[in-house]
Image: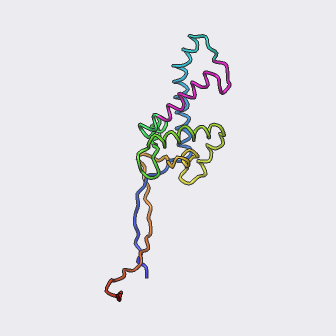
C-alpha cells in the first residue's frame, strides 16, 4: 500500500494577459517619448524626413533600435521594464537561473520581432498555460508578480518501505 503525503508548495503567481498588456502599452509610450525627445530634434536639425513610413526608413530603423535596446537592457539588468515595474511584474527563467544575455536577446529581439511581424501572436498569451507569450515559450521564461504568491497542495504517493532484511541474496 502506498503512503500519501500532502505537501504545500508556494510559488510566484504568473502575470495575466491584461497586466502584461498594460505594462507593454506603458513601455511603448515610454519608447515613443524617448524617440520623440531624442531623435526627432536631430532629424529636424539635419532636415531629414520624418514622414517616410517604410520599414527601411532611417526613422523606422532608429526607432526600432531604441525599442529593442529598451526591452533588452531593462530586462537583462532589472528583469523588468518600467511598465512591468509599475505593475509589479518581472521576467524570470523557468528554471530559476538568472537571465543570461542569450535568453534575453532571444526573448526580446527574436520573440518580439516575430510578435511584431504577426501582431495576433501577442494574443496567444491570453490562452497559453501560465499566460506565456510566444517570446516566453521560445526563451523558456515566464512573467510573474513580484510580491504575489499562491499556495498549491500537492499529494505525493510514496511506495512502501522495503526492508533490506527481508530480501535475501545468494552468491
Farthest residue to the left: give it.
Answer: 165
Residue 168 in sight here? no
The residue drawn where x is 43% and y is 82% is 1
In this view of the protein, which residue sits in the foreground, 50 or 151? 50
Does residue 65 sit above or below 140 in this rendering?
above
Look at the magenta stretch and give its main secondary structure. helix
Q: Would you say residue 94 sits in the magenta stretch?
A: no
| Quadrant position of residue 25 | top right
Q: Residue furthest front?
A: 171
Q: Nearer the viewer, residue 50 or 165?
A: 165
* Rendering coords of residue 37 (x, y %): 52, 19
Instruction: Give me the residue at 40% from left, 63% from top.
Output: 8
Q: Residue at x 53, y 41 (%)?
A: 106
Q: Which residues are magenta?
A: 50-72
Q: Position of residue 30 (x, y in %)?
A: 52, 28
Say how the picture is coloured. rainbow
- Residue 71 belongs to magenta span: yes
Residue 142 falls left or right of residue 54: left
Q: Nearer the viewer, residue 61 or 26?
A: 61
Amino acid at each position: 500500500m502506498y503512503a500519501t503525503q500532502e505537501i504545500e508548495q508556494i510559488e510566484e503567481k504568473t502575470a495575466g494577459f491584461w497586466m502584461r498588456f498594460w505594462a507593454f502599452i506603458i513601455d511603448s509610450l515610454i519608447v515613443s517619448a524617448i524617440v520623440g525627445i531624442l531623435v526627432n530634434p536631430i532629424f529636424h536639425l539635419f532636415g531629414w524626413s520624418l514622414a517616410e513610413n517604410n520599414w527601411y526608413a532611417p526613422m523606422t530603423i532608429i526607432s526600432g533600435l531604441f525599442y529593442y535596446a529598451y526591452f533588452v537592457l531593462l530586462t537583462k539588468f532589472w528583469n523588468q521594464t518600467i511598465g512591468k515595474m509599475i505593475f509589479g511584474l518581472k521576467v524570470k527563467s523557468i528554471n530559476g537561473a538568472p537571465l543570461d544575455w542569450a535568453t534575453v536577446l532571444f526573448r526580446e529581439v527574436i520573440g518580439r520581432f516575430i510578435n511584431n511581424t504577426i501582431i495576433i501572436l501577442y494574443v496567444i498569451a491570453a490562452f497559453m498555460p501560465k499566460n506565456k507569450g510566444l517570446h516566453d515559450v521560445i526563451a523558456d521564461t515566464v512573467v510573474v508578480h513580484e510580491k504575489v504568491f499562491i499556495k498549491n497542495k500537492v499529494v505525493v504517493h510514496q511506495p512502501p518501505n522495503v526492508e533490506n532484511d527481508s530480501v535475501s541474496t545468494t552468491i
